């Protein structure tokens, strides 16, 4: 089992910035990637950004150029820096860890997924 604890989030005006952080503990050896998903009301949970142990990153098209993900393998943490936030970024953001295979633009889960408790991001217009 992997435990994930998130911090950050909150309310920000459009154009503003926020930073999310997530710390992993437990069976870290069982994961090779950490990332962030989000779920807006009435919508499916979607991948926002992911970073593999080797440093490979992938982003949702909607956040490319605005969000940046960074992982510290020594500390087992992953951060998401979010700039130029838009009202459509409003959602609950979940830290995620698991075993993934990244091939081209495809991100495929190959094992159990672990989730943080979720943190609300609200962007006002």
Image: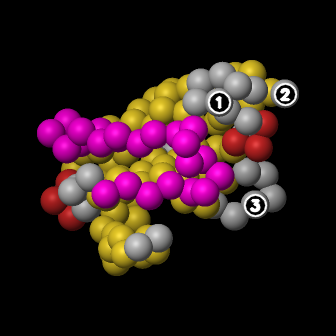
What residue is pinned by disc 2? 125
**What SS does tag 1 mark?**
loop
Badge 2, how many Cα within 10 Å: few under 14, some, many 20+? Answer: few
What residue is pinned by disc 1? 84
Residue 47 drawn above or below residue 10: below
For marks 3 and 1 on the same chain, the one whose residue lies earlier in the sequence: 3
What residue is pinned by disc 3? 43
For marks 2 and 3 on the same chain, the one whose residue lies earlier in the sequence: 3
Residue 124 drawn above or below residue 96: above
Quadrant for the N terminus in the image? bottom left
Is label 2 in contact with label 3 (beta carbons under 8 Å)?
no
Query: Where is residue 11 drawn, in percent x and y?
Result: 69, 24
Residue 62 drawn above or below residue 105: above
Q: Say if residue 96 shows up in the picture.
A: no
Query: Where is residue 49 drawn, in percent x and y?
Result: 48, 52
Alpha carbons under labels 2 and 1: distance apart: 12 Å
Q: Residue at point 70% right, 42% down? A: 89
Query: Where is residue 58 drawn, in percent x and y?
Result: 44, 58
| Magenta residue span | 56-78
Quadrant for the C terminus in the image? top right
Q: Residue at point 65% right, 52% down? A: 62
Indicate whether residue 10 is drawn in magenta.
Answer: no
Query: Where is residue 44 drawn, in percent x and y?
Result: 69, 64
Q: Residue at point 78% right, 52% down? A: 41
Is label 2 in contact with label 1 (beta carbons under 8 Å)?
no
């Amino acid at each position: 089992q992997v435990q994930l604890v998130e911090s950050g989030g909150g309310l920000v005006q459009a154009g503003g910035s926020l930073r999310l952080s997530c710390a992993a503990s437990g069976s870290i050896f069982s994961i090779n990637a950490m990332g962030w998903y989000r779920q807006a009301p009435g919508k499916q949970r979607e991948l926002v950004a992911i970073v593999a142990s080797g440093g490979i990153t992938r982003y949702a098209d909607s956040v490319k150029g605005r969000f940046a993900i960074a992982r510290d393998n020594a500390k087992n943490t992953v951060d998401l820096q979010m700039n130029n936030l838009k009202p459509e970024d409003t959602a609950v953001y979940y830290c995620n860890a698991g075993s993934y295979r990244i091939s081209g633009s495809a991100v495929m889960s190959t094992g159990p997924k672990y989730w943080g408790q979720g943190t609300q991001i609200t962007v006002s217009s």
